[in-house]
Image (tube, grey):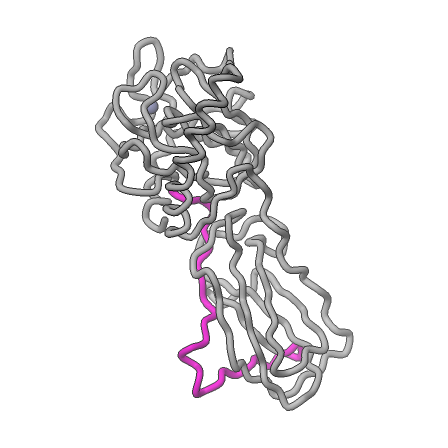
């Protein structure tokens, strides 16, 4: 796609937009059902994720009985940072005491706690929930990987697993920073699809993900929409300032104008449009760009997105 997009960012005429918006509402239902199958409920108007559970503070004189986890369920088993659903633990403990000072740790695959939630005076046999927003103790997004919730007493003793129900206890999940932007069959094209490939008058600033028109496109990383509009070369396009990354991601040639508007907040994995071939394009595909800080035509530079796309494709 073009390097000439920087100047004009024309807006659609209001009348035309109204017609297309009605058409898009119909298509969004299809995108929505696909998104739900892959774990994301769409929020077409955009919106920030709800806050995660508060961390709480440790009791000054912690006390707990002998603890047993009698039920534990983690949902969903795969989540994205700033995504549609946060990892959530629902749990119930049994104890030899009426009041128990607990800590719920999010532990990585090496057993290291990356985030801790303190819960004081917890009664046995009462269901509780912790929802993790994917940030580590320093407030930064946690790394990609497998995690688990760990329930223990603030005195240090881990909660035992209820022997008879052990196989039903679910505490593990995966968290990823980015989602693959096309939901459905795709490939990475020929050499002309690559970043840096020759185009008339410029070089290719993104990677072309080949996929059928009409497949949902989702935000690789949620954040704030910088631009959503139409441009002669890009066709219908959306640019998102990725939350906590410094990177912008750009999506071009969308089948129809996105419902999103500049300033909207979107979540990782949220549908933002459909694969199309609008603008300067000869086949159905998503032209995808990644720009370094401070962003897309804001002083940043485009980088080759293919290594990232290949990585995201392995788990999305
Ligand atoms: Zn392209």
Question: Residue at left 67%, top 81%?
Answer: 123
Question: Residue at left 30%, top 29%?
Answer: 285
Residue 229, percent across and down?
49, 22
Classify residue 43 as left or right of residue 216: right
User: Where is 10 relative to 254, above or below?
Assistant: above
Point out the quarter of the image occupied by ligand 1: top left
User: Where is 262 relative to 69, above or below?
Assistant: above
Residue 161 magenta-highlighted:
yes
Q: Which residues are magenta?
A: 153-180
Residue 197, percent across and down?
29, 21
Question: Residue at left 68%, top 78%?
Answer: 122
Residue 49 magenta-highlighted:
no
User: Where is 37 relative to 99, above or below?
Assistant: above
Classify residue 71 as left or right of residue 48: left
Q: Quadrant of residue 55?
A: bottom right
Residue 2, percent across and down?
38, 16
Q: Residue furthest bottom?
A: 96
Question: Residue at left 30%, top 14%?
Answer: 199
How many numbered discs sit on the rendered protein? 0
Foreground pick, 155 / 209: 209
User: Where is 171 relative to 3, above or below?
Assistant: below
Residue 71, percent across and down?
51, 78
Q: Quadrant of the N terminus?
A: top left
Q: Residue furthest left?
A: 190
Classify residue 100 as left or right of residue 44: right
Q: Residue furthest top?
A: 201
């Amino acid at each position: 796609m073009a390097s000439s997009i920087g100047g004009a960012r024309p807006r659609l005429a209001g009348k035309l937009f109204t017609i297309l918006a009605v058409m898009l509402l119909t298509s969004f239902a299809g995108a929505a059902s696909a998104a739900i199958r892959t774990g994301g409920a769409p929020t077409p108007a955009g919106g920030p994720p709800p806050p995660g559970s508060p961390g709480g503070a440790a009791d000054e004189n912690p006390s707990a009985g002998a603890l047993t986890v009698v039920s534990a369920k983690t949902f969903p088993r795969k989540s994205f940072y700033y995504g549609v659903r946060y990892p959530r633990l629902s749990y119930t403990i049994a104890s030899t005491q009426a009041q128990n000072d607990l800590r719920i740790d999010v532990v990585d695959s090496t057993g290291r706690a990356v985030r801790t939630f303190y819960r004081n005076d917890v009664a046995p046999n009462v269901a509780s929930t912790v929802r993790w927003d994917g940030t580590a103790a320093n407030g930064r997004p946690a790394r990609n990987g497998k995690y688990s919730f760990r329930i223990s007493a603030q005195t240090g003793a881990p909660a035992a697993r209820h022997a008879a129900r052990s196989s039903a206890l679910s505490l593990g999940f995966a968290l990823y920073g980015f989602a693959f932007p096309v939901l459905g069959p795709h490939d990475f094209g020929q050499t002309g699809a690559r970043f840096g490939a020759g185009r008339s008058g410029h070089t290719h600033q993104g990677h072309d993900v080949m996929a059928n028109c009409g497949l949902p496109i989702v935000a690789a990383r949620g954040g704030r929409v910088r631009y959503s509009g139409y441009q002669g070369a890009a066709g219908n396009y959306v640019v998102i300032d990725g939350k906590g990354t410094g990177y912008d991601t750009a999506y071009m040639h969308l089948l129809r104008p996105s419902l999103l508007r500049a300033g909207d907040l979107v979540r990782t994995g949220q549908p933002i449009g459909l694969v199309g071939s609008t603008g300067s394009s000869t086949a159905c595909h998503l032209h995808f760009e990644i720009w370094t800080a401070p962003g897309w035509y804001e002083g940043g530079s485009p980088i080759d997105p293919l290594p990232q796309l290949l990585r995201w494709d392995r788990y999305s």
